[in-house]
Image (cartoon, rainbow, N blue to C red):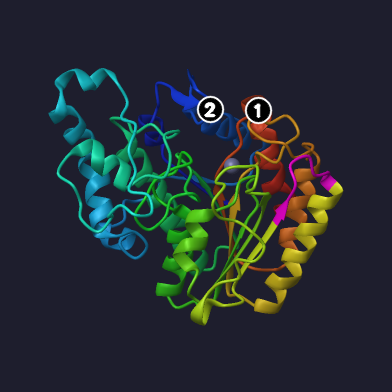
Amino acid sequence: MLTFYNELHAQHRGRYEIFRGEMVPCFEKPERVDAVLAELGRRGLGKIVTPHGVPLMSLERIHTPRYLHFLRTAWSEWLALDPANAGKDAFPAVWPVRTLRDDIEPDNFCAKLGLYSMDSGTPLTAGTWTAAKTGADCAVNAAHALRLGQRGAFVLSRPPGHHAGADFFGGYCFLNNAALAAQHMLDDGAKRVAIIDIDYHHGNGTQSIFYGRDDVLFISIHADPRSEYPFYLGHADERGEGAGLGYNMNLPLPAGTSAKAWFAALETACIRLGSFAPDALVVSLGVDTFAGDPLSRFALQSADYLKVGERLAYLNLPTAFIFEGGYAVKELGTNVVNVLEGYETAL
Ligand SMILES: [Zn+2]
């Protein structure tokens, strides 16, 4: 297992986030990746590789040029509003919902923030672009390694990616690393790539990016969006559209779901993955399904993550694991590395 990692992830460090009406310390913080890196070192699970930077063109395969330009320039625009903003993170506060127009990019930076975001829970900071770009580099490098014959690769980056769409951020995510990895493999000659998203939250960004396509199968096992973030996508009746009809599978489960029911959903997902016969697999690896996670209400225990990795290994596919959510920092290293070790051991 090759791990792609760059310490520049720590450049994205939100001061606080808005959570249930309060300003609270960020759940999504550099210590999350530090914990996983330390555990990888303890268990000696293969080489850690610093990725090389990929051209912006690679990112434009998934994200719109307009959105990428916004992300690259956002911090300087924030400072241009008021130099005192250097001491504050940027948060959106107005959105172009339904009857409002989203086809014209406003000049006002606060309005741009709303145009390119889906919630107010995701601080944009001085180092956000650097960290997100580095994560995208890791994802594309991992995909490239699989195409060169590597069996397993792990993208140890943050901020996470699966809530980010082609032209918006949210849910702590800015660039969709899983989508970038899948697209890179297709561009490099793969015929079909599957993505399985096992984060507690539905991967709305990834779904929306591939919704009309039949060369990427997207499957997500997540908490029912009626009660859990991202709320407005992730229902079982979303099956894809046009050529993509039948290539999107959502397996929402009620909050409080047992580990047994969760593994039954994983089995359903794996059967569909097998019938799709992809050339490679991308795993959006969130471990906020853990019983002790502060944001979530599933019930997996640390030992269960070994079984997750084992089951995915039986699919017998080149696999890129992309780090997504998981906020119980103390157990985070154990839970993530258990998936990787389960995968390696079963190969
Ligand atoms: Zn999550």
Q: Main secondary structure of the magenta part?
A: loop
- Horizontal side of 76 relative to 20 (left or right) equals left
Residue type beneath disc 1: Pro
Farthest residue in the right direction?
260
Image: magenta residue range? 252-259
Between 253 and 149, which is closer to the camera in this rendering?
Answer: 253
Residue at image coords 72%, 64% = 269
Circle 1/circle 2 CB separation < 8 Å: yes
Q: In this figure, which residue is indicated by the disc labeled 1?
A: 294
Closer to the chain start, of discs 1 and 2, is 2
Question: Mark 2 is on which residue type?
Answer: Phe
Q: Is residue 257 magenta?
A: yes
Q: CA distance from mark 1 to mark 2?
A: 9 Å
Callout 2: 10 Å neighbours few (<14), some, many (20+)?
many
| Whole-percent x, y for residue 86 in the image | 23, 21
Identity of the residue drawn at 23% across and 34% down: 75
Residue 43 showing in the rendered view: yes
